[in-house]
Amino acid sequence: MINIAILGFGNIGSGVAEVIEKNQAEIKNVLGDNLHVKYILDIRDIPGVVNDINIIVNDPDVKVICETMGGKEPAYTYTHLALEHGISVCSSNKELVDAYGVELSAIAREHNCSYLFEASVGGGIPVLRTIREAFGHEKVSRIAGILNGTCNYILTNMKAGKDFADALKEAQEKGFAERNPAADVEGHDTARKIAILASLVSGKKFSYEQVSCEGITNVTQQDIKDAEAQGMSIKLLGVYEAETQSVNVAPYLVPASSPLYGVNDVFNGIMVTGNMVDNVMFYGRGAGKLPTASAVVSDVIECAKTLGRNVKDGLEDLEPVASVNAPAKPDGQKFRVL
Ligand code: HSE
């Protein structure tokens, strides 16, 4: 039996416990052992839950920790501490990966454990693992992705005639939105995700602060109707271009000929272009309790299979990129066209 702990028992953390409980037979089959949630830590006083991280990191039974707290603190301090104790950490926390991923990756290597973060980008879509394992030999020229489930849900519902505020409320009720939904609708969440993807494929650290970022708050019903009349759909995209070293987040007009056009509701779509493989499209639920928790559990299984060793995470020794460009917007136009 492999003992794990979950830090943060909100939407995703409780989802991790649920995935482990419901899919124990499948987990046993792939891992050759059972996963057991020995501790749950939360800052709230919930019966059966611990509040002190030291209890967890000082228990030699604990082999893997899931960090599903979100935000920088105390997630950074707890992750640092766990890795220093040789305990692998699997995170859904894109804010932490963006801000401290390179440092945490180095600490994991130093202590023969791993820092994995599949759930931080694309919810349940195994895009980071695929990029790490299957695209290492590719020169990735471009990534264009619908990376925020909440914004895609809002834009899809606005196209169907719903009001922005009502659609956002629904996305919050369904557990898609961030605690502060401004991070979704102003594009910051997408910026963190595209910065992580750009870092993994370019070998340089792109950070969220460098990304030119425009959200969906200025997109009107009329814009959506006008786009529809031209056979296009408005999507919030994160776009990375290797040649111009540009990364930006903005609402784009997506033509019907693009596979991203039909990505609706909470779904994410990520188009990765490699010089040999050409276009590869990833599609799946970009937010929500169980899809995101499933991605965390996939990392837990990888860490549990490799105890005492470090798994490459793609952030090894990345130097910060000097500057990041943004593609120009066509003169007089509100939106770029994909
Ligand atoms: N708020 C995020 C989204 C959650 O809507 O995509 C998943 O990262």
Image (cartoon, grey):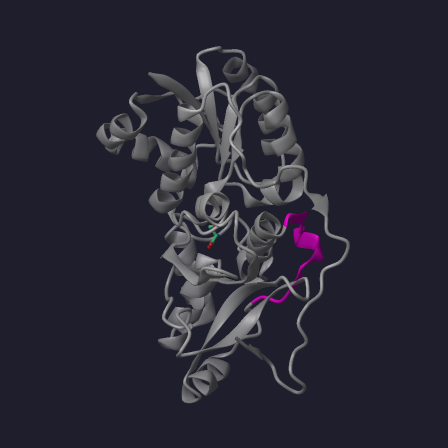
**Number of numbered tags placed on the structure image:** 0
Q: Is residue 307 above or below residue 269?
A: above
Q: Position of residue 219 (x, y in %)?
A: 53, 75
Q: Does the magenta stretch include residue 249?
A: no
Q: Residue at x 51, y 25 (%)?
A: 88
Examine the structure image and report whether residue 212 is included in the region drawn in magenta.
yes
Q: Can residue 39 be seen in this view?
A: no
Name of the residue lying farthest toward the left: 25
- Where on the picture, by quarter, is residue 80? top right
Residue 158 falls in image quadrant: bottom left
In front here: 215 or 136?
Answer: 136
On-image quarter of the N terminus: top left
Q: Residue 324 sits in which quadrant?
A: bottom right
* Along the line of sight, the residue nearer the viewer: 73 or 44: 73
Q: In this view, does 94 lie to the left or right of 133?
A: right
* Residue 252 shown left or right of residue 324 in the figure: left
Residue drawn 60% across the image and 81% down it: 334
Q: Residue at image x 65%, y 65%?
A: 243
Question: Is residue 153 depicted above or below 89 in this figure?
Answer: below
Residue 120 seen anywhere in this rendered image of the structure: yes
What residue appears at the point 46 percent right and 66 percent down from the top-left corner? 165
Which residues are the magenta region?
A: 203-215
- Residue 100 position in % (x across, y down): 65, 38
Query: Nearest the camera: 266 or 331?
Result: 331
x, y (%) of residue 232?
A: 44, 81
| Residue 174 % position (x, y) | 37, 52
